[in-house]
Image: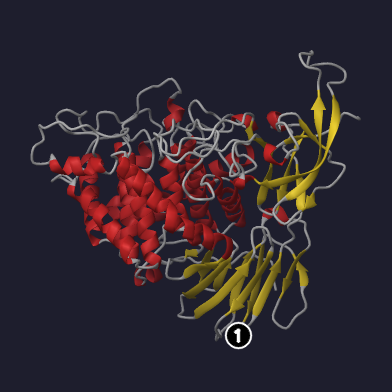
Amino acid sequence: MTTTAPATRTSSSAVAGARRFAGTVSPSSSTLTPLDATEIRLTDGFWAEKQALNADVVLRHCEDWMERIGWTGNFDRAAAGLGDPGTPWEHSGIEFVDSEVYKLLEGMAWELGREREPALQARYDALVDRVAAAQEDDGYLHTSFGRAWQRPRWSDLEWGHELYSMGHLLQAVVAAERTGASPRLVEVGRRLAEHLWSVFGPEGRVAICGHPEVEVALAELGRALDEPRWVELARLFVERRGHGLLGQIEYGSEYFQDDVPVRDADVLRGHAVRALYLAAGALDVAVETRDDELADAVRRQWEATVAARTYVTGGMGSHHQDEAFGADHELPPDRAYSETCAGIASTMLSWRLLLADGDARYADLIERTLLNVVLASPREDGRAFFYTNTLHQRTEGVEPDEDELNARALSSLRAPWFEVSCCPTNVARTLASVEQFFATRTADGVQLHQYGSYDVDTVLDDGTPVALSVTSGYPLDGRVAVTWRGDVDREVELALRVPSWADGSAVTVALPGEEAGEAQGPTIVVRRRFSAGDVVVLDLPTPAEWVRPDARIDAARGQVAVQRGPLVLALESTDLPSGTVNDVLVDTTVDPVTTPAGARVELSRSRTPAGGWPYGRSTATADSLGSVELVPYATWGNRGPSTMRVWLPVDDLEA
């Protein structure tokens, strides 16, 4: 048993070309090869339950809401008006609601890639037909622009989101192609890409979209359809960014990432979702064009952003006004924007970096972000969502009306739908394909990056079949058992990620026929000729532990958080005897006590005289609250209105 990183694979193009399916990302060359929906399947437990909820509830919830408020109907009205362009009709929703329909289609396609459920296929096909009917003769497809009573095509590149929306359509096309869900939608995508090439290609208009997204979509479409022109168009859009092509706005050109060329930037900045989508697209372009300088720029930006502009949950974006990254270490818990879409975009970027480099740090951030940001968004019944993810809710707020469209991101509880509902559909497409983050392969074996219960059935480059089952009560239980379901006729490697939160802990690995022994990460590689029935067990300790912030994070200095394994915990007023979380203090001389669902800590309540001057030699006295339960952050707000906080002020009144 060794503790080295997995071997590097130089090319997967031949293998990828032989497969009928592929995943959300399928680079032509990489260190690790992603598995597709035919090679990995969630079987039971935590993640299988989340994915089943998505298939049974979330997808239909998104579909029903968009039908009800007319967003899907925009395509019907656009199609009906193709032969009579002078007849006005009213567009429902803001400019980019087409993109929500496309994300829904993508999520449906990934579900259909697992199982051809007839009812879902029929709904999907009907929606594809409605979208396809609205495509114009030259391939253009957008319901908000181009008609006599609408703004002209490409007349508002700063805010119109035309290319952004089309990018989401092309990602739905990739899913349709790789799952075989809809040849018709694939043809729609081909025609649209041809149109974009003619308008924005090498001989066309030198312009970019105010919201990056088309870059990552075109790069993946080029891979999926084996068309280098789409990768080249993605490259052009990436290279044009940072040269002031977009108009000046009050937030500055960095809001659009149009202030500095991508390859010259040192950190992600501006609007968080825009920045992360752009970085993901830039890395795709770098991989496909073998542009090491561009790839290194993205790595540099990821490292700087994770080091100084990321919340303990993995969330990104600390500004409400412009939904942007703040300055280094500007991470106020109570003003955290941490948009759900930014969390999803972060996993997209980290996944691409993981495939390119094989570095376990990228898988660490994926785990943290999925469990503490992405899964915080959907309510436990799958019918309401957080748009933003604060780390300190100071007021209880009110229950949102389940039948009303909610203002964007303003609800203190999850709301069923928003005027800008990018997050619910983004959650839907992510959960529909989430297992694709869990494992990869190389010529030498299989690498497990995320834990839960799932089966892997794949074939290595030389034709060696690998079949194994992973079982775990993760994330609350750190025991991971890997059972081989078939004999392997040569030595292969099984690589197991040791999460960064377990660094320095007594991690143990039990091998077939051997006693368990201690091991160290970040990656444990077991190399042997496995036989059917062999079991490798990784034990990761998951006790509740204190987490302290970097001293430069002023807004969290003097406070602690509690983490249990990969889960960040939170205090909800629901679990207090009375009152809010705003005046509690925690006793760090008593270690947190691990409980089945979280942890318990010793709390007191700060008592400052009402109306008194809040500064002095001694700020307050404290009344004991005793031992109080903390819950996983992603579950907060499911029990009704409450106040909540992740960072707890330390009780230093006796000092």
Screen quadrant of the C terminus = top right
Structure colour scheme:
secondary structure
Identified by mark 1, the residue type is Ser
Q: Give the SS element for disc 1.
A: loop
List x then y, in percent, for residue 416. Answer: 45, 41
- In this view, the residue in front, 482 or 581, is 581
Res. 340 in view: yes
Picture residue at 18% right of the left edge, 40% below the top = 78
642 left or right of 233 in image: right
Looking at the image, residue 497 sits to the left or right of residue 356; the answer is: right
The percent coordinates of residue 456 (x first, y second) are 51, 72
Q: Nearer the viewer, residue 573 or 19?
A: 573
As displayed, is residue 321 above or below residue 303? above
Q: Position of residue 568 (x, y in %)?
A: 67, 47
577 or 495, nearer to the observer = 577
Q: Residue furthest right?
A: 654
Image position of 426 with respect to 184: above or below: above
Q: Which residue is mark 1?
A: 531
Q: What is the count of numbered marks? A: 1
Q: Nearer the viewer, residue 57 or 546?
A: 57
Instruction: Name which quarter of the figure residue 601 lies in.
Output: top right
Q: Is residue 502 above or below residue 345?
A: below
Crowding at dot 1, Cα within 10 Å, few <14 / some 14-19 / many 20+, comes out as: some
Q: Position of residue 486 (x, y in %)?
A: 55, 84
Left or right: residue 231 versus residue 504 is left
Q: Residue at x 57, y 74 (%)?
A: 469
Q: Is residue 567 left or right of residue 232?
A: right
**Quarter placement of the N terminus:** bottom right
Q: Residue at x 40, y 67 (%)?
A: 114
Viewer can see residue 190 = no
